[in-house]
Image: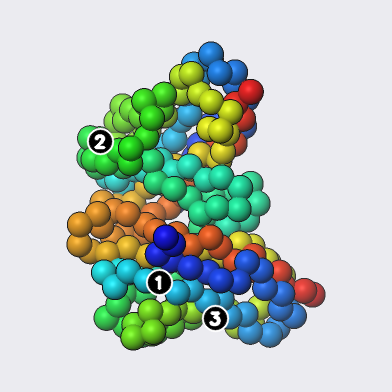
């Protein structure tokens, strides 16, 4: 299984809603990542988990809250988002948190904040 | 300031011919480079990588060339096929501090014309 899955594929939410994005991989990877990608822009790193611990938070606003319940799952909890947070949210994983490990990406969740 | 640049937003190539996608970088600490392919509504898919200790890496129809002195890499696809039509992202990382970080270019949209 060389796949990273993400649910839901599409999400529309209001600014007062609370929602969660889910990501799953069964490749035994110990590093997992959240990226945000706006239209016609490259992916921007948000968070990195290594061995289920948050390693990196790239100065992401607190309305985005990551969680890694176990080595296969990564969640992104959303609360009080702004319309400018509308984007494609990509999850990725790699064997370890080092540069020589390719990152495998999921298909993404297309988020629209109204 | 963009550390990874893909100066051609788009490229059209006839089926069967060679596609050459270019990427330039400015950070001399980068020592590992990757190419990702992205179809609409999907996450990026890893294609091929190269370490700075090499100047060429080949995998089937895909070859990546690295010119460290010019801080330039290119992806060659030979022969090009209609299924290769996608957005191609160049990415770079360093084995130093922040080695988890993949810095992406803005992408080049390749269209292979049957």
Q: Element at badge 3?
A: strand
Along the horizontal axis of the image, is B21 left or right of B1?
right
Q: Residue B6's x, y, as percent?
A: 53, 69
Q: Is residue A42 above or below residue B114?
A: above
Q: Residue B72's x, y, as percent?
A: 43, 79
Q: What residue appears at the point 56 percent right and 76 percent down from the top-left corner?
A: B21
- Disc 2 chain ID: A
- Disc 3 chain ID: B
Distance from disc 1 to disc 3, alpha carbons, whole Å, reads 18 Å
Foreground pick, A61 / A3: A61
The reply to whether callout 1 and callout 3 are in contact (CB within 8 Å) is no
Is residue A59 among what the camera can see? yes
Between tags 1 and 3, which lies in front? 1
Which quadrant of the figure contains the C terminus of chain A? top right
Q: Quadrant of residue A99?
A: bottom left
Q: Residue B44's x, y, as percent?
A: 52, 54
Q: What residue appears at the point 46 percent right and 19 percent down from the top-left corner?
A: A79
Tell me the residue that label 3 is attached to: B76
Are discs 3 and 2 located on one and the same chain?
no
Q: What residue appears at the point 51 percent right and 39 percent down from the top-left corner?
A: A89
Q: Residue A7's x, y, as percent?
A: 53, 32
The earlier-in-sequence mark between 1 and 3 is 1
- Disc 1 chain ID: B
Tell me the residue that label 1 is attached to: B25
């Amino acid at each position: 299984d060389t796949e990273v899955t993400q649910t839901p594929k599409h999400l529309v939410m209001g600014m007062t809603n609370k929602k969660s994005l889910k990501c799953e991989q069964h490749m035994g990877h110990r590093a997992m990542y959240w990226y945000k990608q706006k239209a016609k822009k490259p992916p921007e790193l948000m968070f990195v988990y290594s061995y289920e611990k948050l390693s990196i938070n790239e100065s992401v606003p607190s309305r985005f809250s990551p969680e890694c319940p176990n080595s296969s799952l990564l969640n992104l909890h959303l609360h009080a988002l702004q319309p400018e947070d509308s984007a494609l949210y990509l999850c990725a994983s790699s064997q370890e948190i080092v540069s020589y490990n390719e990152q495998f990406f999921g298909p993404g969740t297309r988020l629209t904040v109204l | 300031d963009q550390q990874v640049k893909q100066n051609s937003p788009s490229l059209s190539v006839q089926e069967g011919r060679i596609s050459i996608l270019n990427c330039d970088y400015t950070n001399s600490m980068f020592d590992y480079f990757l190419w990702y392919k992205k179809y609409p509504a999907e996450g990026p898919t890893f294609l091929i990588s190269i370490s700075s200790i090499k100047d060429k890496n080949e995998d089937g129809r895909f070859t990546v060339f690295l010119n460290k002195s010019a801080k330039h890499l290119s992806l060659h696809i030979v022969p090009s096929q209609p299924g290769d039509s996608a957005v191609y992202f160049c990415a770079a990382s360093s084995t130093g501090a922040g080695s988890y970080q993949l810095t992406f270019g803005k992408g080049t949209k390749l269209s292979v014309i049957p």
